[in-house]
Image (spheres, rainbow, N blue to C red):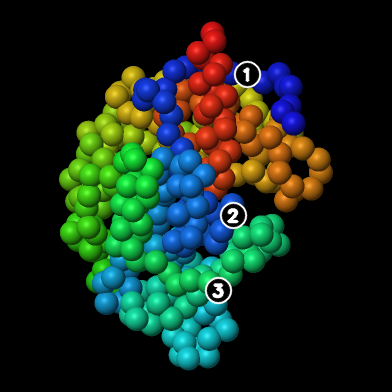
Amino acid sequence: MALTIAIPRREARPRTAAPIVVAHRGASGHRPEHTLAGYELAFRLGADAVELDLLATRDGAVVCRHDVELSRTTDVAARPEYAHLRRTVEVDGDPVTGWFVHDFTLAELRGLRTRERWPRKRPTSASFNDRGPIPTFTEVLDLVARESARAGRRLGVYAELKEVRHLARHDLWLPDLVRGSDRPEITWMGFNVAALCALDLPERTVRLFERETTSRELSKISEYAAAVAVKKKAIYPRGADGRLTEPTKVVEKAHRRGLSVLVWSHRAENQYLPADFRIGGNPHGHGDAVGEAELFFRAGVDGLITDFPELGVAARQAYSAAISSA
């Protein structure tokens, strides 16, 4: 049931003909993240593209995983044959103990099985635990090609270069490792400017931000990227009560500099929604995520990165119907 609420809205048309829906780590609201099953489901639910996080193994294979430490999303802790690989390393300035992607060869890593990150929050997804290995980047690109043929349209990949500096300290420079896999359907994403510039594909580069960006930053970004991807709160901040406040001008400022804007990460659970869109008191229950997504489309974003691609598609349909009848 949709909510009727009074919230500030800035009406703006996106730069693209229709905003795109990008499945965050695949259909990660329904299947364990970064699995072939999750990517396939994302496309079957209507996603235009899937978002990948790329890391590298000890022998330089590029694989799809968000965390450089493996215990939260695989069965590694239950595998005694890998106990000797457990250690403590510094990641982003903090000591982290566990098993790390870059300590495994691809053959060793493929012995692990994937698991749901939040089993209590997403029990349906957790029911698909231990069904498949960590996919390689090449496997995902092959899947996207098959799904594009099935759908009769080009489907895309938004590939984020993860932990670039950390991997570089282990003699793994991600831009070099992915260069041979580049295809027209890939858009490259990241926080590390040096890595993005090393790829030298400005027309297919997205700069990630966790905060609102300044006009000066956006001008610099436009020299090496075609788009920015920002957190939801960078567009719609929240007040102390968890409700939305006045929107920022980040979309308008980016568009003025020729940059498209994607927003992340859209999720259905109440704990991730502003109070305006929550339904009931269960933080793991689902709120009006379609309404929230439609709000961002009305704010002018060019793409939504979501764990639930079918909700993004529904919001886009509602948005398109609204502007067609206006």
Q: Quadrant of the N terminus?
A: top right
Residue receiving disc 2 = 30
Residue 98 drawn at (x, y percent): 51, 77
Give the percent coordinates (x, y) of residue 195.
Answer: 26, 52
Spatial distance from mark 2 to mark 3, Cα to Cα? 15 Å
Q: Quadrant of residue 233?
A: top right
At 56% from the left and 45% from the top, the residue drawn is 308
Residue 192, image x and y in percent?
32, 51
Residue at the extreme top of the image, as rendered: 326
Q: Is residue 210 visible?
A: no
Mark 1 or mark 2: whose residue is earlier in sequence: 1
Image quadrant for the C terminus?
top right
Mark number displayed over residue 262? none
Disc 1 from disc 3: Cα separation:
44 Å
The residue at 64%/43% (across/down) is: 268
Residue 129 seen in this snapshot: yes
Determine crowd level at label 1: few under 14, some 14-19, many 20+ residues with C-alpha closer than 10 A.
few
Number of the label disc, if any, that sits on residue 8: 1
